[in-house]
Image (cartoon, helix red, strand yellow):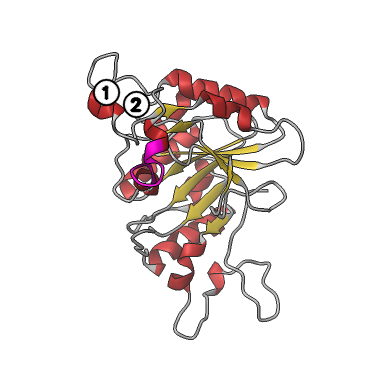
Amino acid sequence: MQHTKIEWALNPDGTPGYTWNPITGCLNGCEYCYARKLANTRLKERYLANHNVAPSQCGTINPSANEINDPFYPRFWPERLGQIPLFGKSLGIFACDMSDLFGIGVPRQWTARVLNHIGECQRHRFYLLTKQPQNLIKFSPFPENCWVGITVTHWEFLPEALYNLSHIEASVRFISFEPLLEFIPIDGLNLVKHKINWVIIGAQTKPTVYPKIEWVKEIVGACDKAGVPVFLKDNLKPLLRNSEGWTPAWAISARSCDSTEYLRQEMPK
């Protein structure tokens, strides 16, 4: 496990949380993926040393040479299951930020094994985030300590995300609009109808691509209408401040006092 700078992956006491990667690698193929860049640079040697790779996507049992030699091809690290402390402080843990626990090519038994272990670590909170929402129902109901989310970057992905979240059992269901790559019309009543408990909004990074402020405001307005807490990532700060340094009121946390402004970063109750 490692400390993380991901702002929303918090410990229950509000302090910075952790990332944990018993599975690495992903076949979703997102162009903006930071994890693939790391796997092909700083982490390449370490990943290639692990020969516990997923079955081939080419129709054969054994992975091909190209798959084995791809550091971002899905790999399982069972020894990392033992990294979660059973005692001590309750932690917030983002599981598989270097993969997709429910992703393409990840064997179902790997995912089930990780979820079973999560269920045994009830003192901790686990954040699960996927771009393959259709696979969530296979593992529902989720352990009570799981917050389950779906990444939505374009409007066409929203209906499937809402549908699948409303059909699973999880303590918290959330949508991450990060990176927010286009205008996504959304109604607060839809968030309520589909049992959404939390929304995250962020920009694309490395390279940085900011959404338009109107896109962010549309989603925040829907969340306010539905009473859903919204978490604005720090990478939105340059977008939300004008030339005089002012942040719009709808993007400021209720914690603000005097002349100090806090970016709105709400968590589910």
Task: Find the magenta span and give its range.
Answer: 38-45
Please say if 91 is above or below 108: below
Image location of residue 33, percent across then percent down: 35, 47
The residue at 34%/59% (across/down) is 183
Q: In screen coordinates, is 5 left or right of 132?
A: right
Label 1: few (<14), some or many (≥20) within 10 Å? some
Q: CA distance from mark 1 to mark 2?
A: 7 Å
Q: Please state the horizontal and vertical placement of residue 244, each as a whole percent of the image.
A: 49, 86
The answer to which of 71 and 114 lies nearer the viewer is: 71
| Residue type (three-letter) at the residue carrying disc 1 | Gln
Q: Amino acid at mark 2?
A: Gly
Task: State the image quarter where residue 24 is shown.
Answer: top left
Query: Can you tell which quarter of the image residue 158 is in?
Result: top left
Residue located beneath label 2 in the image: 105
Question: How many marks are shown on the rendered structure?
Answer: 2
Specify the quadrant that holds the N terminus: top right
Give the class, few, some or many, for how many residues have Cα within 10 Å of label 2's Cα (few <14, many ≥20).
Answer: some
Q: Secondary structure at mark 2?
A: loop
Labelled disc at residue 57: 1
**Image mark for residue 215:** none
- Residue at x 49%, y 69% (from the top left corner): 237
Q: Residue furthest bottom?
A: 244
User: Are dots 1 and 2 in contact, CB under 8 Å?
Assistant: yes
Q: Is residue 209 magenta?
A: no
Is residue 158 visible in the rendered structure shown here?
yes
Relative to 1, is 56 above or below?
above
Residue 31 sits above or below residue 99 on the image:
below
